[in-house]
Amino acid sequence: MVKQNIRLGRLGGVPVGVHWSVAVIFGLVTWELATLVLPQTDGGGSRPEYWVAALVAAALFFVSLLAHEASHAVVARRRGVGVRSITLWLFGGVAQLEGEARSPGADFAIAAVGPGTSLLLAGVFGAGQLALEGAGTHGVVVAVAGWLWQINLLLAGFNLIPAAPLDGGRILRAVLWRTSRDHTRAAVRAAQVGVGFGTLLIVLGVVDVFTGNALGIWPALLGGFLLMAARGEETAARERGGVEGMPVGAVMDHRPPVLPSAMTVAEALAGPWWHGGDTAAVVGPTGWLAGVVPLDLVRSVPAHQRYSIRIGDVAAPIAAVPVGRPDEPMPALLDRIYGAGGCPAIVLDADNRLAGVVSLDDVARAGRRPAGGAGRDLSGAVR
């Protein structure tokens, strides 16, 4: 999950922000427009004029990206899917959803509206360029309008490539889900196409670099991001399928360690707390739940800091922890876990007391249970 380094505000109640990498792409887009695109397109302006126009064009480009992601968020909420955040970053933007669509139709609508919004913006900027030219206007204003409709058209076209995690991959998943009636199989297939497309971009980028085109680094980097994201989606799809039909109570650790937030990391590692579990609940000074902490995260603290760093310092705070109930469907809680960036969940009973915890490791173990048990193994489900 891409983190927001700067919060811009809220849009319809959804937190909107930017990752620090936006500064990199904003600077590159502005530089390319001011030194290459606008002088070649217009040719009659001054250097300061090009830089001002480039800054405006780059800002409008990011507004276009925000509109693209906001459209996903709006349709997702209308279709009953929560939206955690919208974040702009190096490779565009991402609307972080809190779960999966409930039907192929909803999945299709949520995915398709993004490219549709970009196409609409391309039409608006294109019409603006024609109107300006019809009124006898020339110069950088017309050139900026022309670049904006072209970049939005390119954005729509790229996102329609049928490879997860692109919007086209989501559309492919919805179509496969509709035809096969198997959401897991559809999601795995779309992710596998995404793995192939990401690999292709990496190869093309590397070939470009070795033939003397330094700009080939960009498709290689984009391909690397798509490859990792697609593999993550494939893993998530298989894990979700592995716990399909199972309640949370069948997956959770019923006896998780419970550690005080004031305990040092050294004490946590030295004591007999874990008894085979991989996630501990953390309680504050008053005894109330304060968060969760995975054992791997505790072990990752450098040895020389373990006597000074406390469990509360490394635990995920309770406000960021997904919450489930023992009798709810496990896939619904898994959606929230992924929406929280993989943070383990706490499970509360009817009296809001701690009943257990669920980590992604618990989900993976449940999915590997034999067919006669509570789970089913999907390792050979897709060929």
Image: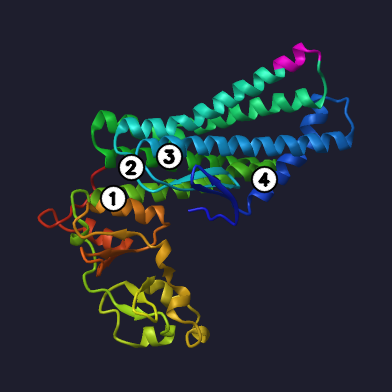
Q: Earlier in the sequence, mark 3 or mark 1?
A: 3
Q: Give coordinates of residue 120: x percent, y percent.
A: 56, 24
Q: Nearer the viewer, mark 3 or mark 1?
A: 1
| Helix, strand or loop status at disc 3 | loop
Marks 3 & 2, CB-CB < 8 Å contact? no
Residue at 46% of width from left, 39% of height from top? Answer: 73
Marks 3/2: CA–CA distance: 9 Å
The amino acid type found where label 2 is placed reads Val
Question: Label 4: few (<14), some or many (≥20) within 10 Å?
Answer: some
| Residue wearing tag 3 | 164
Marks 1/4: CA–CA distance: 36 Å
Q: Mark number for residue 332?
A: 1
Q: Inspect this view and state whether residue 230 appears.
A: yes
Marks 3 & 1, CB-CB < 8 Å contact? no
Q: Please report the bounds of the magenta region as a residue range.
A: 130-136
Q: Mark number for residue 25?
A: 4
